[in-house]
Amino acid sequence: MTTLDERGREQGEEGGGEHGIHPDAAVALDRPAAQLPLSAGSKAANLARAATAGLPVLPGFVIPHGAGDDARALRHAWRELSRDGAVPLVVRSSSPQEDTEESSLAGQFASVLDVHDWPGFRAAVRTVLDSADRPDGTRAPMAVLVQPMLDARVGGVLFGADPVEGRLDRMLVSAVRGGPDTLVSGEQDGTSYHLTRSGRRLRPTPPHTTGEHLLTRTELHRLARLARRVERIFGGPQDMEFGFDGTGRLWLFQARPITAMTARPARGARLLGPGPVAETLPGTMQPLEEDLWVAPMARGICSALDIGGSAPRRLLRAHPVVTTVAGRAAADLRLLGIAPPRHRLLARVNPLPGARRLAAAWRTGRLTRALPDLALDLTADIDRRLAETPAPAELSRADLADLLRWTRSALAALHAQEALAGALLRESSTRTAASAALAALAEGRGQGRTDTEIVAGTPVVLALTPPSLTVPLRLPPTEENGHTPTVSSTDSRHLTLPTRESLRLRIRWIHQLQVHLVHDAARRITLSHRAVALLHWHELLDTLDGAPLPPDVKQRLPRPDSPPLPDTFRLADGSVVVAERPRDGAAQGVSGGRATGTAWDGRGERPEDAVLVVRTLDPALAPLLPQVTALVAQTGSPLSHLAVLAREFKVPAVVGAVDAVQRFTPGTRLAVDGTSGDVCLADTRTREVADR
């Protein structure tokens, strides 16, 4: 292509450079200067690189950032490209700050289509330049890209990778009739194609509204070939706009890096989720809370899985059963047996799990008979130690450290037996610590006692609250007219509870003892409750043994409250949480019965027929159960506190309802079947099942 200033000198139109035409006022895309992003902008520079490499790019020119308003030079360039107005033009933004690896700024700046005459061209250039003004008063650097307006038969967007799933071995195409502008602006919904890198379709593509596919198999292969060529030029997969003209020729309108590529977990990454551990530890934890509560829980559950032969020791040693992500507790769902195996057929014929369980059958058979007595002995030892423990202020530093060490060992033993009881025992009693706690709480509130007095008198109420080193203990509110169960004894240490519930209650008591011990330790080493929670376990013990505080302790910041973890997820590089796509069969009915009501999230005014829809089975929700019609949770197990309590109150309950909080917003009419696990929209005939 002859450059615009050279063509002007050849024709003598309006003079050459020596007659007032600025050679840099309009730079043709085939000139090296057009490949400089700082002056030509990223959009024009990328197209100039692609054109130089032989890709199908329309001719054009760019008005560089900072170029003077040389009307004569611009008119000369406009005349040549538009053939004096016979060919309509596209005037587009090309800022150095858009179409980069850090940010695309898609749609932030203006583009003007179908520009015919010189006054319209001047107005379009002003529109693009004015779009560089930002609401905060600053101005983005701006160049202007000008190309012919192509009358495209089909246009669209081509991704050289799958940004949704983070896959580099897939390509995505979305196409519409006409140019891609109506697609990227949202005016039209495109027809989508999922392709391999060779251009083969991966799944059936629904036909367009006309009943025909927009792109042929050959055209899809040509698009894939274009994407591979663009990737070689720019060093990575690109986000491209394209168009096929009336003759079938393919044109590249734009190429920019994919800026929103989803992280992809490594092959074989563990399947994690809050699962049942969120029922005990539902919130964001600080470092010392993780060391005090998560580490013993992981040790205890690992021991239970090993004893029961539920998982190979190799995996139990290599991966913690319970871990934390951004301060929130998460469990390995496959090790816990909550998630199905990756390959169900292979798992069915694999003899190793059966052999492992057969080897464990003898000891688990004996253990099933002995477990109630073992649990009774353990709880008796815990109760005796708690009763004999003096106030923390009466302990020496060494005794305080020894007692903290004992609490961690006791928690590991309690978690191990609690997990075994849940797996091995089939107890007929449905009595829960939560129901006893509700009765004690209602009685205490009725007597006008404070929360501190209620906890001191009937510590069973701790079953309604999660532990925390930083948040003051607050018991959940109760409703004056709400139904609560009754207990025969106000001495919570002598409540007759099923084995698993009794163990769970002791776990919570140990948590609260640890809170008191750590707070007293903080007083002795002159730290606040929030600051001591930022220490690690070994740092706290060293400080109690006389070592100085870590030098950076005053610079440490509390971990912010992180958003709830997805129900199921895997970790990519850098501990990036990648949510797993839900699978069928996740929902499970845990409390029989059927009910119809109005979805409620537990906040604000409660509907008369409320169906409580929550993410996790937080023990603090227990006071709400007597007042709701049904319960739906995204995670949880049939053995959780709230699931057992729902059965006691005869409230239909479903756990594992995928995306329930998003799908069933407050006010939605729902029908809940606590036996089958179905959750349906009650106002329509179309059934929406929670686990599908």
Image (cartoon, rainbow, N blue to C red):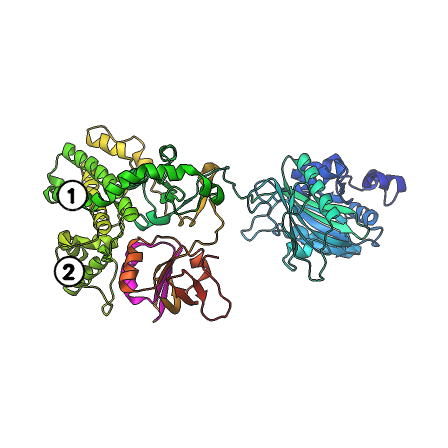
Magenta residues span: 609-634
Query: Residue 20 placed where, x, y %?
Result: 81, 42
Label 2 or label 1, whichever lies nearer to me, is 1
Residue with the most extreme top position:
547
Compared to residue 437, the image places residue 286 above or below, namely above
Residue with the most extreme right position:
11
- Numbered circles on residues, count: 2
C-alpha gap between disc 2 and disc 1 = 33 Å
Compared to residue 457, the image places residue 26 above or below, namely above
Work out whether residue 14 or residue 590 is closer to the camera in this orientation and state it: 590
Looking at the rendered structure, the secondary structure element under dot 1 is helix
Work out whether residue 514 or residue 338 is closer to the camera in this orientation and state it: 338
Query: Residue 413 placed where, x, y %?
Result: 23, 40
Query: Residue 12 placed where, x, y %?
Result: 89, 42
Mark 1 is on which residue type? Asp
In the rendered image, which quarter is residue 255 located in?
top right
Which residue position holds label 1?
377
Query: Residue 407 placed where, x, y %?
Result: 20, 39
Which residue position holds label 2?
449
Q: Are marks 2 and 1 in contact (CB under 8 Å)?
A: no
- Which residue is at 80% across, 53% downward? 246
Mark 2 is on which residue type? Arg
Mark 1 or mark 2, which is nearer the start of the sequence?
1
- Which residue is at 25% across, 61% downward? 477
In the rendered image, which quarter is residue 3 located in?
top right
Q: Is 614 left or right of 170, judged from the image as shown? A: left
- Which residue is at 77% across, 45% downward? 58
Work out whether residue 178 or residue 510 is closer to the camera in this orientation and state it: 510
- Which residue is at 52% across, 41% downward? 264
User: Could you tell me if residue 288 is visible in this image?
Assistant: no
Does the magenta-highlighted stretch encompass residue 106?
A: no
Q: Label 1: few (<14), some or many (≥20) within 10 Å?
A: few
